[in-house]
Amino acid sequence: MKSRRFFLQKAGLSALALNLTPFNPISAMTQDIFNTKQDEKPLRVAIMGLGSYGTRVANAMKDCKRAKLVGVISGTPSKIEAWQKEYGIPAKNCYNYETYHQIKDNPDIDAVYVITPNGLHMEHAMGVAKAGKHVICEKPMAINAAEGKKMVDACKAAGVQLLVGYRMHFEAKTQEVIKMRMNGDFGKVLFFQGLSGFVIGDPTQWRLNYPRSGGGAMMDIGIYSINGSRYMIGEEPIWVTAQETKNNPEKFKEGIDETIQFQLGFPGGAVASCLSTYSMNGLDKFFLNGLKGFAEMQPSTGYGPIEGKTHKGPLTNPHVTHQTTQMDEMAAIILDGKKPLVPVDGEEGLKDLVIIDAIYKAVKTGEKVSLV
Ligand code: NAD
């Protein structure tokens, strides 16, 4: 990112020469240039998978300052046409699943955001990497750690970045709690509770179809409690125990978990106790307890506004559409090498997949599974 100094040099001005009063025309002109951010190259993004979340991201990107939606990849021509109209996407930036490899010859696209069903993330992300474009991939990054590792390796080999759509890592109230924990405001943290769930509808949807989903509630919503326990406690778990309850085996077939309770043990002595479910509504709560204080967030990972308080009072940071902040921050990570407060790279996505694999193993064996 070019700096303010760059602008002052370009304008033949120095900071000392400027009279920074509200009515100074030179100051106003310079400020205007800063606001339009004409010096900052945008991250030009194509979205792959024009479904419900892809649409949410596209709408949120209308307010982005650094990220710009410029292309689409879809198997449905009518959706492509509608998106071209809605988002002003040129025909030369439109692809389907047979042609998207040609994106390598398109200099006007920097990154592809993969927002397809979980079971297709690896194939799609690796295809994008092979085409030499940066990959942003929705959560879960893949359906198991072995797939996730292949994605990380493929992106490294292709020299492209791999980021995972962990929008909460950029959310202001979440960041406030993380900073308080880093500051020692909670004292020694010994307990985290994460509750993540909703009642899933249509039994024919891909989320309940193992090859497409890779699992049930854990893959879809339980991952928020896994990821949240890690960024809230600030450590990596060393063991897992887990128990499954299945009340509706007709709807939740083999490989599709309905409800799993799981516990994660952390090296500093903290324990996370979490619930992941497709059968209870409105479960979206985080609770962090330390020897000197607490944080409580409910809702904690929904689209917001996030609500919460700590022992010091309510969390008051303003709400911004999560995906708008996420995409601008990801542009800065990819284009400027910015380091986020909590990582969002492929290694971060892989850590959650290793834990998910261990949770499924713990459910199957009934045993405590070591992560070290
Ligand atoms: P969706 O069903 O609404 O959209 C999926 C899209 O993928 C559709 O446009 C569909 O046509 C396309 N697709 C391409 N190939 C397909 C195939 N072979 N089978 C089925 N669909 C195919 O799903 P969604 O809710 O948009 O979820 C997509 C991804 O986004 C998932 O990985 C999900 O976990 C993730 N997601 C993330 C968040 C978040 O807050 N970060 C929220 C919702 C969904």
Image (cartoon, rainbow, N blue to C red):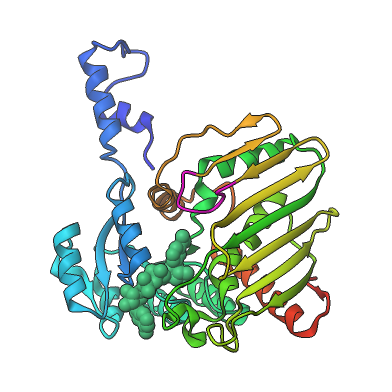
Asked if 309 appears above or below 244 in the picture, the reply is above
Quarter holding residue 310:
top right
In the rendered image, residue 123, in percent from the top left (x then y), is placed at 44, 82
The quarter in which the N terminus is drawn is: top left
Residue 79, picture quadrant: bottom left
Q: Residue 127, position in %: x, y? A: 39, 80
Say whether residue 66 is magenta: no
* Quadrant of the image where one finds ligand 1: bottom left
Residue 252 seen in the figure: yes
Q: Based on the displayed image, in which of its 4 quarters is residue 48 positioned?
A: bottom left
Q: Is residue 192 left or right of residue 95?
A: right
Percent x, y of residue 25 = 20, 15
Picture residue at 71% right of the left edge, 33% below the top? 311
| Residue pictured at 79% horizontal, 84% vertical | 365
Q: Is residue 199 above or below residue 74?
A: above
Residue drawn at 49 percent across, 62 percent down: 163
Q: Quadrant of the C terminus?
A: bottom right
Residue 94, position in %: x, y?
20, 72
Q: Is residue 300 magenta?
A: yes
Relative side of 16 to 236, left or right? left
Q: Residue, x 78% and y 51% (percent of image)?
A: 191
Q: Is residue 213 left or right of residue 105?
A: right
Picture layout, residue 108 above or below residue 364: above
Of 183 and 247, which appears nearest the observer?
Answer: 247
Residue occupying the far right of the picture: 269
Find the magenta span and give its range: 298-305
Q: Is residue 146 above or below residue 79?
A: below
Between residue 173 and residue 169, name the one nearer to us. 173
Q: Residue furthest front?
A: 247
